[in-house]
Image (tube, coloured by chain):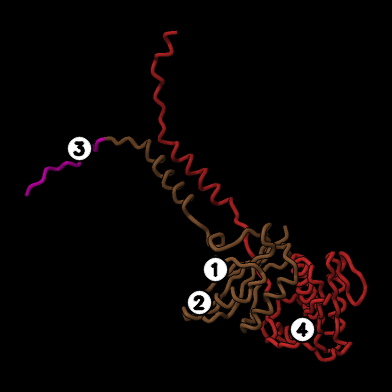
Amino acid sequence: MKRRRQNLPKSNSGAIADVSFLLLIFFMVVTTFNKDYKLTMTLPPYTPDKVSGPVPSNRLVQLLLNAENELMIQDEPVGEESTDLLTEKLSKIIKQGLEPIVIIKMHPNTSYQYYIELLAEINAAKNNVRTDLAQENFKKEFAELNINQQKSIEQKVKIKISEQEMKL
Amino acid sequence: MIRKKDKSRSLPEINTTALPDIIFMLLFFFMVTTVMQPSKKGAPLVLPNTITDESTERTKPNELTIFLYNNDEHGQMLSIDGNHAVINNATSALNNAVVTMKENQNFPQKAILRIDQFTTMSAVNKIKELLQMQEILKIEYVHRKEA
């Protein structure tokens, strides 16, 4: 019983600071913040009455996005394989030397998430066409080409996107 | 003028055990008081996920950031510079924001859209149409990357 009263032995606490800083710096280095990414777009100038002229059917890729977030490409319902199908359709038009016009028709209640996914898919399809062209013309990856070669391919792979909201 | 050489005299020992406590207190104080940029003006929203990997840059003064989110009470709302408005009042909200920017000699060049993933496209399209009317034609959809 008497032992309790004894003073505790002094411990050297000078190293606690080192240890805690080590932990702090470790977690600072290991932590990653959620990074934001972007999809850039240029809108057409404002026109009050949105009447579009006739679109030549050989340049047209029509996409339909409904309220249940299902996609149709040229009146065919598609699921997972949409990027491949888009790539195929776009490259067919581009190889004829034409500029594809992608028309996205969407239901007003389509959720933004699916619209963004669709835009990303169009971008991915565009990249695929670019890689294909780079392989065909220069037998190299797109990233390995010099600036002039890259420009010549960019010139060919241009896509117009037109958006319409369905009237209910 | 002659100083005593006191090199040989040792310094009195200082107890440094409380030093980390002070430093941690400072650290926690600054951690707690620091406010990160987006949450200051922003709105509670979840950005959509997708695959593209072009990362965003720091917002410039001539860029207009628009938040679009869902509120349980008021439905779909937008927020510009900390001013929140219902989507039906979007026209005046955007007008005010553009006017304030122009007063500060910042002519809006680009709109940065931070939109909740469950927002409907009718709201998004409305904002885009308003931006076209304001002649802000460059837009940026901010999203997270799919894991």
How many numbered circles are shown? Answer: 4
Residue, disc 1: B81
Q: Chain of mark 4?
A: A
**Chain A, hue in figure:** red
Residue, disc 3: B9
Residue type at the position of mark 1: Asp
Alpha carbons under labels 2 and 4: distance apart: 34 Å
Secondary structure beneath label 1: loop
Q: Toward the viewer: A150 or B112?
A: B112
Question: Picture quarter containing residue A95?
Answer: bottom right
Name the residue located 61 percent from the left edge and 70 percent from the top edge. Answer: B66
Question: Picture quarter containing residue A123?
Answer: bottom right
Name the residue located 48 percent from the left edge and 40 percent from the top edge. Answer: A20
N-terminal of the two: label 2 or label 1?
Answer: 1
Q: Do badges 2 and 4 share one subunit? A: no
Residue type at the position of mark 3: Arg
Residue, disc 4: A160
Q: Residue B100: which numbered mark, if any?
A: 2
Residue B108's spot in the image, x, y percent? 56, 80
Position of A103 with respect to A46 (left or right) is right
Q: Chain of mark 2?
A: B
Residue A167's spot in the image, x, y percent? 82, 77
Position of A85 with respect to B30 (left or right) is right
Residue A11's spot in the image, x, y percent? 41, 27
Secondary structure beneath label 2: helix
Residue type at the position of mark 2: Thr
